[in-house]
């Protein structure tokens, strides 16, 4: 078991140059810093009464609220049940201790291959590029993982790159985190320049929620980096509800496609967010309209503090069957759960 970090997923310190003269920092870094971090401010922006919202200062102390203002703008004012708000608001239900919900539910602690490198499945090495995220999702299993101290970037990527170079069975590197795109683009370019020297790599994958929660991250510098990569790139975004998309997200996704990446979406099945066949169908259709194919619908990882989001397996299977009965096959994501020790995500 991995001890809980006091403050996981903290924002990456900005480069000295950026802090010294904010005007010269990329625009996305300024928007990142300007995120809403106070639950009462968030509720105020939505015209909601903080006293009635069940917000928890204890939950927010363990895993702080963080949400970019552009994402807040997509929430429905005056609606405490808004599916986007529910994903980010720290509430007292998180403090319940529920049997079966642990601190390292997905076995990442046991699958560590080198500093910041996790390998659970054949051929694919997951690289924890950073512990930071632009948004803090309450249901996230990473809320308990001390990724802030355990990233591949710490020693200029040397140990992580060496571990991948030594193992010719690895043909795909997955940049993950936290959110790998929370790193400045030159830092990412430094990593991929090192990886490019490894002959057995054939694909690069990026797991990022940033095109959805902070689409401004998809700027000219990022697109230039992506288009110049020497491998085919799978770019897996993360959206749980159709309302997470707007014109700015569409534009970011179109630009990513223009840079030649294959776009996929992974979602988490969440009670009170998307546990209805209409919501899931809308999500798939909205993804496709934005050029994104549904990939996975994850059953929740059973970590402490997230039990109130759980959808029972039986209901999950029924929802998935109803979705398959309604949509084109390519719009139906695979319903999976992660079981420690398995050779891949397990279909339900
Ligand atoms: C989910 C995951 C992957 C990717 O699995 P795919 O089924 O290929 O999407 C790779 N490594 C780790 C550690 C994972 O958790
Ligand atoms: S779900 Fe993704 S974006 Fe959200 S907190 Fe977890 S790692 Fe970060």
Image (cartoon, grey):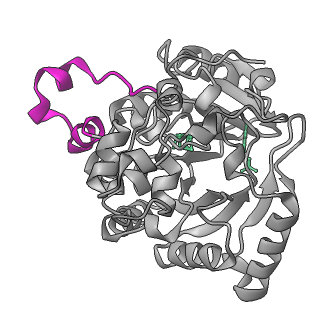
Residue furthest to the front in view is 51
Instruction: Determine the residue positioned at 47% across, 16% down.
Output: 156
Tell me where residue 86 appears, x and y as whole percent. Answer: 51, 54
**Dominant secondary structure (helix, strand or loop) of the stretch shown in magenta:** helix
110 with respect to 247 (left or right): right
Instruction: Determine the residue positioned at 82% across, 67% down.
Output: 315
Residue 140 visible: no
Figure quadrant of residue 97: top right
47, 203: nearer the viewer: 47
136 with respect to 40 (left or right): right
Tell me where residue 143 appears, x and y as whole percent. Answer: 59, 31
147 with respect to 71 (left or right): right
Is residue 26 shown in magenta? yes
Span of residues in magenta: 10-34
Tell me where residue 126 appears, x and y as whole percent. Answer: 66, 35
> Looking at the rendering, in which quadrant would you find the C terminus?
bottom right
Figure quadrant of residue 254: bottom left
Up-down: is 9 above or below 339?
Answer: above
Up-down: is 298 above or below 16?
Answer: below
120 with respect to 206 (left or right): right
71, 89: nearer the viewer: 89
Residue 156 visible: yes
> Looking at the rendering, in which quadrant would you find the N terminus?
top right
Is residue 151 shown in magenta? no
Instruction: Determine the residue positioned at 61% across, 14% down.
Output: 159
Tell me where residue 137 appears, x and y as whole percent. Answer: 53, 44
Instruction: Determine the residue positioned at 63% across, 68% down.
Output: 294
Quarter of the picture for ligand 1? top right
């Amino acid at each position: 078991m991995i001890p809980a970090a006091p403050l996981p997923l903290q924002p990456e310190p900005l480069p000295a140059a950026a802090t010294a003269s904010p005007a010269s920092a990329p625009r996305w870094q300024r928007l990142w810093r300007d995120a809403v971090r106070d639950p009462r401010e968030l509720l105020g922006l939505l015209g909601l009464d903080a006293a009635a919202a069940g917000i928890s200062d204890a939950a927010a102390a363990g895993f702080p609220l963080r949400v970019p203002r552009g994402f807040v703008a997509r929430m429905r004012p005056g609606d405490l049940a808004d599916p986007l708000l529910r994903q980010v608001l720290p509430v007292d239900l998180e403090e319940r201790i529920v049997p079966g919900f642990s601190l390292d539910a997905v076995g990442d602690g046991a699958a560590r291959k080198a500093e910041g490198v996790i390998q659970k499945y054949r051929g694919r090495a997951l690289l924890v590029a950073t512990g930071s995220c632009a948004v803090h999702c309450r249901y996230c299993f990473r809320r308990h993982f001390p990724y802030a101290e355990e990233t591949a970037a710490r020693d200029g990527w040397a140990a992580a790159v060496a571990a991948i170079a030594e193992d010719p069975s690895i043909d795909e590197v997955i940049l993950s985190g936290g959110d790998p795109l929370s790193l400045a683009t030159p830092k990412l370019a430094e990593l991929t320049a090192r990886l490019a020297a490894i002959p057995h790599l054939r694909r690069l994958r990026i797991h990022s929620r940033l095109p959805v929660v902070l689409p401004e991250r998809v700027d000219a510098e990022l697109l230039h980096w992506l288009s110049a990569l020497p491998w085919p790139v799978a770019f897996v975004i993360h959206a749980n509800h159709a309302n997470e998309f707007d014109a700015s997200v569409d534009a970011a996704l179109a630009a990513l496609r223009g840079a030649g990446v294959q776009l996929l979406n992974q979602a988490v099945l969440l009670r009170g967010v998307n546990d209805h066949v209409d919501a899931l169908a809308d999500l798939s259709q909205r993804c496709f309209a934005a050029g994104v194919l549904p990939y996975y619908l994850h059953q929740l990882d059973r970590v402490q503090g997230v039990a109130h989001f759980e959808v029972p397996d039986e209901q999950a299977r029924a929802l998935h069957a109803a979705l398959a009965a309604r949509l084109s096959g390519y719009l139906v994501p695979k319903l999976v759960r992660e079981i420690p020790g398995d050779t891949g995500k397990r279909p339900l």
